[in-house]
Amino acid sequence: MLRHLFVLPSNNAVGALRVPPEQGDNASTYLCGNSLGALPKRSAELVSEELSVWGSRAVEGHFSHPHGREWMNIADRVTPYLARLLGAHESEVACMGTLTANLHLMMNVFYKPSSTRYKILCEGRAFPSDQYAFASQALLHGFEPQDAIIELSPRPGEFVLREEDILQCIREQGTSIALVLFSGVQYYTGQWFPMQSITRAAKEQGCICGFDLAHAVGNVPLSLHDWGVDFAVWCSYKYLNSGPGGIAGLYMHDRWDDIVLPKLAGWWGHDPATRFQMPPTFSPIRGAQGFQQSNPSVLATVSLLGSLQVFEEAGLMGPIRAKSLELTGLLESKLRQSKWYVPTENVAELYPDANTRLLPEGERVPTVGKPGFTIITPSEPESRGAQLSLLFLPTGAGIMQKVFDELKSYGVVGDERKPDVIRLAPAPLYNTADDCERAAAVMETVFNSLYA
């Protein structure tokens, strides 16, 4: 869509040894924006400007800035953009910290277990950092994680959760659940959870409802305020293209403004009108920004700002989502045409020993059968974002790694999830139909060379 505004790694840079030498400096087929987004040229320019200001003005840059971006207010520059992407009010959004630190901040406020309502409901195989946070919060409150955490897994022979199973669990166990906390988009399978219906069901049972939006923000349209989501956290280096380890953020619905106060206060969450007077008593900013603790990294914040300006130029999530549906649908269609493709519904029959529940590597048993792959991401557009997760069969046979290495040798960059999954994500801001068609064609070439 706006490919010319990004810097993409070249074939030479990614080690594409099978690409003709004359194409070595061409852009690679980069389908890994779900892990690390490409560099926006505007971000590079803004970071360079701030380095110059640092050198020329040093500490004065906090209050006097040649480009009008005084560092003391730098996070305020990105808040309006984030609010529009999240479907939130500006007061409900804070640009700050890192994802897991923000998750702990929100759980410190919203996870208030009692002797009868203490459980945390999440998806099975949540991102490990989230799993660690859930377990440590349960322990912090005196509960054993194996009792306090309910992990929902797909039905036997299936790869993703059914909406009716999630809602049924909330209905049946809601009186014991303190917190419903799902990903927006599941990092491994690419499933976009039905966030609105999960939130509604949680609220009906008196549960707090939050989301980890690491793989959702900038990927799928969100309406956090209107859906009634209590809180959310995210990182910004995936679809938001802020750079490795980029600054994160959190959201808190404004109905909590007069009820919830930060438990772990820091000076950047203090009222800006008196912050630099260094008063001894904490006076929090109203809303989400009261949770800020330390002053944010200016370089990380302007890097995010540069990308968010590209989102604005693209017209935000309406046109971006339309392009995403087109590209992801095209990639899926081309992959399904492969002679090596196995329809998901046939996996159990053709690979009867395959562990479709996707347990950790140590618990897997290698299966037998013809080499191939299936797509474990939902086919329904309303249940996925830009990501397609490919499961390589037979599981446990080492096929994924061979295919992954060969794809890279042709300049196709995806993301490996050991032992058997490759994730491919056509990011609509910079990927094209040609990228999707080439990735599928190279996949066919690789399988033919390895297994024909």
Image: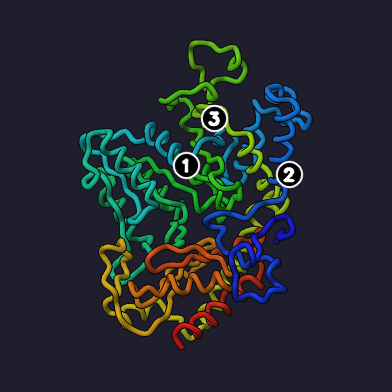
Residue at the farthest right position: 66
The residue beneath circle 2 is: 45
Mark 3 or mark 2, earlier in chain? 2
Please name the amino acid that badge 2 sits on.
Glu
Which mark, by number, is residue 99? 1
Report the side of 358 relative to 386 (left or right): left
Q: Residue at x 60, y 76 (%)?
A: 18
Q: Earlier in the sequence, mark 2 or mark 1?
A: 2
SS for dot 3: helix
Residue positioned 67% across, 76% down in the render: 20
Badge 1 marks a residue whose secondary structure is helix
Q: Earlier in the sequence, mark 3 or mark 1?
A: 1
Q: Nearer the viewer, residue 315 or 213?
A: 213
Quadrant for the N terminus in the image:
bottom right
Between the residue at mark 2 and the residue at mark 1, the CA separation in whole angstroms equals 25 Å
- Do we see residue 402 in this rendering? yes
Marks 3/1: CA–CA distance: 15 Å
Q: Position of residue 405 (x, y in %)?
A: 49, 70
Q: Is residue 362 above or below residue 206?
A: below
Taking the spot 45% from the left edge, 47% from the top edge, the residue there is 212
* Residue 215 relative to residue 73: left or right: left
Image quarter of residue 159: bottom left
